[in-house]
Amino acid sequence: LSLSLSLSLAPPPQFGVDNVLCHVADPTFVGFCSLRGADCGVKTIAKADPHEKVGVLASLGGKPHVVEYSEISTEMAEATREALSGSGTRLLYGAAHICVNWFSLPFLRAFAAGALGEEGSASLPLHVARKKVPCLDPDKGGGSVPLQPSEPNAIKLELFIFDTFPHAAKLVALQVPREHEFAPVKNAPGAASDSPDTACAAFSRLCVDRLVAAGGTVKAPRPCVAANSGNGSRPRPLLEISPLVSYAGEGLEERVAGREFELPQHLC
C-alpha cells in the first residue's frame, strides 16, 4: 500500500470472481468514487424479491453496513417505502450488494495499520455460515465411509471485506442495472438460476444488446450442435464479444454496423 501511494497508483477495485457480468475496473465506477472523494464505494442492484439471497446496504447506528440475507429479519426484508417517483412502493432494504467495491488507498492503509475505529481497534467481525461439508460417517466402516450430508453439518467462520464500510468517513453507492452487471454462478449446471447456463445466457443477451445498439442485427439462430446441457435440452446458441474487441460496447460500429450475424458467434 505504501508503494502504491508513493507511485500515485489508482485505487484497486474489488469484485467477486463468480459474477460473469462484472465490469472489471469500470471507469465509470472508479471515476464516480474518486470524484466524490469517497473512502469506499459500492455497486448495488435492486433486489429481485424481498427474500433474494443477497446482502443489502443499510445504515446501522448512523454508519453504512452490508446486512447479509441470513442476518436480516423477515420484517426488515419485506419492509417497503414509497418510491421516489411516486409510482407505488419499493423495498426499504432493496439495494443489493453485489460484491463490487472500491477503496481509497489512504483508507486501506489506515485500516490495515489499525488506525481506525475506537482507539485504533478496527477489525473485521466473524460471521457464522452453516455449510454441508462432506465427511466420514462415524457409524459406518469404523469411520472410513464417506458421507454426503443432506443438511448443514458444519459451522464456517467467515470474514467479509464489506465490514470495513462502517469505518469509512464517506461511502458512496452506485446502483446499476442487474441485466448489465450481475450474473452470479453459485449453483450446478442445469439449475434454474445462478448457474453456468444462466450466466452464459445473460452474458449473451448483453452482447446481443450491444451489437444491435451498434447497428448490427442477429439472425434467427441455427440449431446448436454442442453437447446436451444436462437437463434434456440443447444449450441455446450464444453470442460472445471479446473484451479485447470492446469493453462495454464502444467501438463496435466499424465491426458490426449493417451486418447480420448468425448465432453462435464469437467476435474476437
Image (spheres, rainbow, N blue to C red):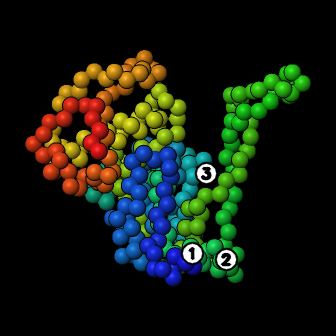
**CB atoms of marks 3 and 1 within 8 Å:** no
Of the residues shown, which amino acid type is indicated by label 3?
Glu
Q: Is residue 192 left or right of residue 121?
A: left
Of the residues shown, which amino acid type is indicated by label 2?
Gly
Q: Is residue 75 left or right of residue 150?
A: left
Quadrant showing the N terminus:
bottom right
Is disc 2 surrounded by few (<14), some (14 to 19) or many (20+) residues within 10 Å? some
Up/down of 188 relative to 178, above or below:
above
Up/down of 194 relative to 177, above or below:
above
Q: Which residue is mark 3?
A: 71
Gap in angstroms between the C-alphas marked 3 and 1: 33 Å
Q: Secondary structure at mark 1?
A: loop
Q: Position of residue 192 (x, y in %)?
A: 45, 30
Closer to viewer: mark 2 or mark 1: 1
* First in residue order: circle 3 vs circle 1: 1
* First in residue order: circle 2 vs circle 1: 1
Gap in angstroms between the C-alphas marked 3 and 2: 27 Å
Q: Is residue 221 visible to us here?
A: yes
Please tell me the numbered disc located at residue 114.
2
Where on the picture, by quarter, is residue 183? top left
Of the residues shown, which amino acid type is indicated by label 1?
Leu
Q: Position of residue 166 (x, y in %)?
A: 57, 69
Q: Give the residue at the far top of this rendering.
A: 232
Q: Secondary structure at mark 2?
A: loop
Closer to viewer: mark 3 or mark 2: 2
Q: Which residue is mark 1?
A: 1
Is disc 3 surrounded by few (<14), some (14 to 19) or many (20+) residues within 10 Å? few
Up/down of 62 relative to 85, above or below:
below
Q: Secondary structure at mark 3?
A: helix
